[in-house]
Image (tube, helix red, strand yellow):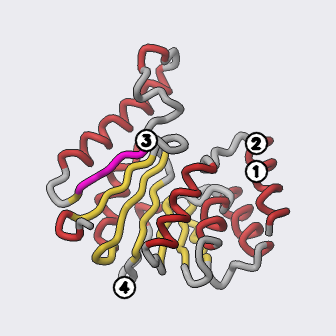
Amino acid sequence: MKETIFQMERYAEANNIPIIEIDSIKFIMKYIKLNDVKSVLEIGTAIGYSAILMANATPDVEITTIEKDEKRYKEAVKNVNSCELDKRIEVVYNDALKVNLAGHSYDLIFIDAAKGGYIKYFEKFCNYLNPGGVIITDNINFHGLVKNKSSIKSKNIQGIVDKIEKYKAFLDSNPDYITKYYDIGDGLSVSFKKNDEK
């Protein structure tokens, strides 16, 4: 398992594939453990790195993770199988916005996919959240650029930062959820229903 995780980190670096920062995944793993999370839905598998680490938080958490890039999906399946976690991690090859999850619900929903889709992902998948569940979103600070926009040189990067700002505004004005922000890793938001507030 440790060897596979190490190989995944090297593969991600060599192939320029973004994977979750270690402080961020440690925060999520701790949350899973402390809150007795049994079911996780992850939007954006990449190579399966975060899904595998979340599955390691407790022996009874089950994860469904969705990836639309075929090459990354295949790499994720290979890694999940290598860690012998295929009974607890289901990797779905599809566009998350086209996936039908009728009949399923989750204790934790983790959004870590294309920034431009964050609002749509939240709006769709919040309907699958169990009472007391949370929606956690990664890359809320986007390499510190959300708080330091003057240093942005690229129009593409500026566009991503604008989308993250729109998402934060959406979260802050959402009448049904309270969101807390954490300067951990690349920035995390944790959203829970107002009537579930702990």
Q: Position of residue 152 (x, y in %)?
A: 48, 18
Amino acid under disc 2: Glu
Q: Are marks 1 and 3 in contact (CB under 8 Å)?
A: no
Residue 50 lies in quadrant: bottom right
Mark 3 or mark 2, which is nearer the start of the sequence?
A: 2
Q: Could you say which disc has been placed on residue 140 in the image?
A: 3
Q: Is residue 132 left or right of residue 117?
A: left
User: In this figure, which residue is indicated by the disc labeled 1?
Assistant: 9
Question: Looking at the image, which is closer to me, 134 or 26?
Answer: 26
Residue 3 highlighted magenta (yes or no): no
Q: Secondary structure at mark 2?
A: helix
| Quarter of the figure that contains the C terminus | bottom left
Judge the density around disc 2: few (<14), some (14-19), many (≥20) Cα neighbours within 10 Å: few
Q: State the separation of the CA atoms marked 2 and 3.
A: 21 Å
User: In this figure, which residue is indicated by the disc labeled 2?
Assistant: 13
Judge the density around disc 1: few (<14), some (14-19), many (≥20) Cα neighbours within 10 Å: some
Q: State the separation of the CA atoms marked 1 and 4.
A: 34 Å
User: In this figure, which residue is indicated by the disc labeled 4?
Assistant: 103
